[in-house]
Image: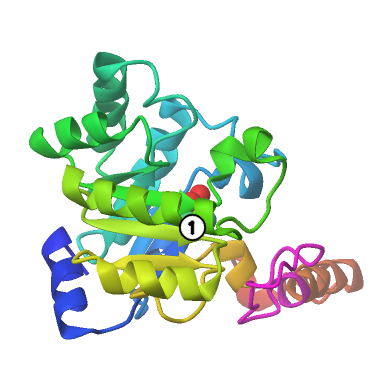
């Protein structure tokens, strides 16, 4: 997928699509050659790349730095969305637009921001200013302290009604797509069927139009972390560790470097 028009097309044709987080040039080059449809420079980089326990430590500058490296790695082959970090769109219109400008100038093709209430005016203004906006509802990790932890959202009727309304209002404000994170599958299905724009699920069942996974989870690089919605498609931790150990073993045994890797 290369533009927001491809998202509309996927929805109309009822074709499923994939998004994967990506934070650096090297992985972006691999993903650019893969079938994965689009990339998200998530503020989850605060966890996966910087080792924090929440996403709250990401800043505009950090997001732009990582997004730029992903855009350079992906070339013109993938649509790249970058997260607007914690608080960057909650300090008024001008500050929000400055944040969006920093992220978009990194080369990202769209921004993603979390939540509905309080964001509609900003979303409308961004879209009207040429910035495609992806929404994010359900479990919104930037609000982890308000939510009381990383928990499934939309469990009761009142919460479900709120998420449904927020999805519709984000669509009305001009969002081109909405991520639904950790909500019951039936709710995600209802929202997906009620929208003209596509939904992307993570821990939201199979009925959403697209799916997203965090790269390190997809590649099995984080062995202690296995929430119900995560599937490891590779034993990244085990296989990479084995490669590092082979290197160490060959150096300490004198096998590497051999003549082949040496200059005469
Ligand atoms: O930051 C992130 O990785 C995300 C995904 C979980 C959707 O927002």
Label 1 sits on residue: 160
Classify residue 247 as left or right of residue 36.
right
Residue 130 in magenta?
no
Q: Nearer the viewer, residue 27 or 102?
A: 102
Residue 164, given in percent of the width and then of the height, sits at: 38, 57
Residue 237 in magenta?
yes
Residue located 34% across and 80% down the image: 35
Residue 150, given in percent of the width and then of the height, sits at: 68, 50
Query: Which image quarter: residue 211?
Result: bottom left
**Main secondary-structure element of the magenta-colored stretch:** loop
Classify residue 157 as left or right of residue 251.
left
Residue located 46% across and 33% down the image: 85
Residue 22 in view of the camera: no
**Label 1 near ligand 1 (CB < 8 Å):** no
User: Relative to residue 48, is residue 204 depicted above or below?
Assistant: below
User: Relative to residue 232, is residue 137 depicted above or below?
Assistant: above
Q: Which residues are magenta?
A: 220-240
Residue 129, given in percent of the width and then of the height, sits at: 10, 32
């Amino acid at each position: 997928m290369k533009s927001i028009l491809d998202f509309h097309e996927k929805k109309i044709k009822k074709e499923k699509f994939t998004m994967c987080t990506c934070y650096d040039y090297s992985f972006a080059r691999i993903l650019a050659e893969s079938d994965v449809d689009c990339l998200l420079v998530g503020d989850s980089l605060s966890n996966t790349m910087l080792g924090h326990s929440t996403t709250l430590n990401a800043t505009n500058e950090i997001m732009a730095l990582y997004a730029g490296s992903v855009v350079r790695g992906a070339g013109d082959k993938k649509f790249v969305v970058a997260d607007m970090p914690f608080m960057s769109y909650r300090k008024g219109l001008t500050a929000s637009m400055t944040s969006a400008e920093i992220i978009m100038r990194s080369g990202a093709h769209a921004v993603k921001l979390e939540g509905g209430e309080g964001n509609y005016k900003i979303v409308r203004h961004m879209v009207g200013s040429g910035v495609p906006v992806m929404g994010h509802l359900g479990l919104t990790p930037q609000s982890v302290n308000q939510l009381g932890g990383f928990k499934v959202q939309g469990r009761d009727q009142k919460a479900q009604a709120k998420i449904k309304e927020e999805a519709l209002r984000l669509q009305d404000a001009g969002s081109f797509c909405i991520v639904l994170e950790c909500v019951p599958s039936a709710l995600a299905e209802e929202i997906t069927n009620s929208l003209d724009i596509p939904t992307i699920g993570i821990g939201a069942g199979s009925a959403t139009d697209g799916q997203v996974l965090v790269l390190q989870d997809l590649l099995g690089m984080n062995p202690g972390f296995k929430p119900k919605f995560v599937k490891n498609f590779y034993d990244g931790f085990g296989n990479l560790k084995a490669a590092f150990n082979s290197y160490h073993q060959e150096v300490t045994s004198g096998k590497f470097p051999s003549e082949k890797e040496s200059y005469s």
